[in-house]
Amino acid sequence: MTAGTRWAAPGAVRTGTGYAPCHHGEILQGVFRDEHGRCRPGLVTLPMSEPGTHARFTPAPDVLAVVPADRTKALRAATLTIEECATQCEREPCGGVLTLVGDIPVGLGMGSSTSDVLATVRAVADAFGLCLAPDVVTRIALSAELACDPLMLDGRPRLFAQRHGRVLEVLGEALPPVVVVGCALAGGAPVDTLALPAPACADSDVDAYETLRAQLRRAVRDRDPALLGRVATASARRGQLRLGHAGFETLTALADRAGAVGVQIAHSGSVAGVLFDPAAHGARRRIRRCARDLDRAGLPVTRTFTTFPTPEEFAHGAAHSRGDRPTGSDTPRRPARLSAL
């Protein structure tokens, strides 16, 4: 909340709602050069349509609050969005109560904070009868979080500078078709991203990331699942140097045994995925065997989904062991079950 802000009566502002999905970690994350040759941390996310966060903004006089009360980033986003919308509508900033309900596991690198923030921005803007432009939403999200995922943009794969809120490159129209068998490394323990060392920025490291960027661009252009898998695996191995996840070598070994095209991880969390080419011979059998082997190895399978539209469901297992995000501060945590898309 901005110091000294007086929250006016709601006036014509109505109750607004918003929704934002999450992602399943990254296909690629590292340090890249922008159009001016400057080094920028960047990432390419692996999007998911669910789970996500639902937000409701109910106007109220003389108060601005969020439920659950610990969602401080969402509260900052609400403050900034109210001020933006009030300016656009030429009104006084109004108060209100923001309520968030979601089932994205926290700390696993699935973009739970960005989902909270984006759902908040959309709910507050909806209350004012507005739909904010993507660059405005990005600016608010970056101010609320300091770094954000590109979930506010359309579904095209893009290299996004998460600390600068800039698109470094749109890689194409869609990721190559792959089936992702999701699981949790390190027992599903959350990762404190602020405690991690900064990504390496030596010229040799940047050159390596730029090579992966070019390969990913080609994989998207050619719709090549195998090349996508090689890029994701190389990025995951580099990320593992910072994260040191227990179970990573087991993950890659099981992926090789099952004939997968590669693995991907959340570079700021413990969620991971084994990537399969759906057109490969015996793909369904390979996927089922991989899910079984992961569970037996102590890497709990969370969900199986695809990068392409499909009416069919794939086998899935028990979800992230850290549990759902509670809908209230007094709601006990319970084991999450994230169904297949």
Image (cartoon, rainbow, N blue to C red):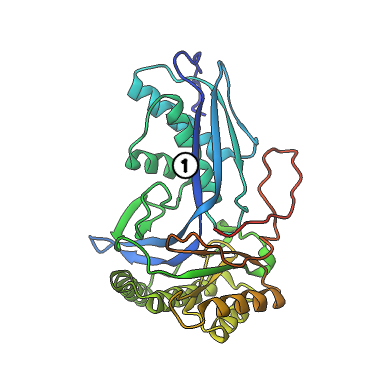
Please give left or right for residue 58 compared with residue 165 in the image. right
Question: Circle 1 sits on which residue?
Answer: 118
Residue sitting at 44 percent across and 53 percent down? 149
Q: Amino acid at mark 1?
A: Leu
The quarter holding residue 173 reads bottom left
Instruction: Please tell me which residue is depicted at 50% across the width and 21% down the height of the picture.
Output: 4
Instruction: State which quadrant residue 133 falls in.
Output: top left
How many circles with numbers are drawn on the protein?
1
Q: Nearer the viewer, residue 173 or 10?
A: 173
Q: Residue at x 61, y 60 (%)?
A: 191
Residue at position x 69%, y 38% in the image = 328
| Left or right, residue 144 beside residue 190 | left
Query: In which image quadrant can residue 41 be found?
Result: bottom left
Nearer the observer, 238 or 285: 285
Farthest bottom residue in view: 257
Rendered location of residue 115, percent (x, y): 51, 46
**Location of residue 142 in the rendering, given as x and y in whole percent from the top left corner:** 42, 45
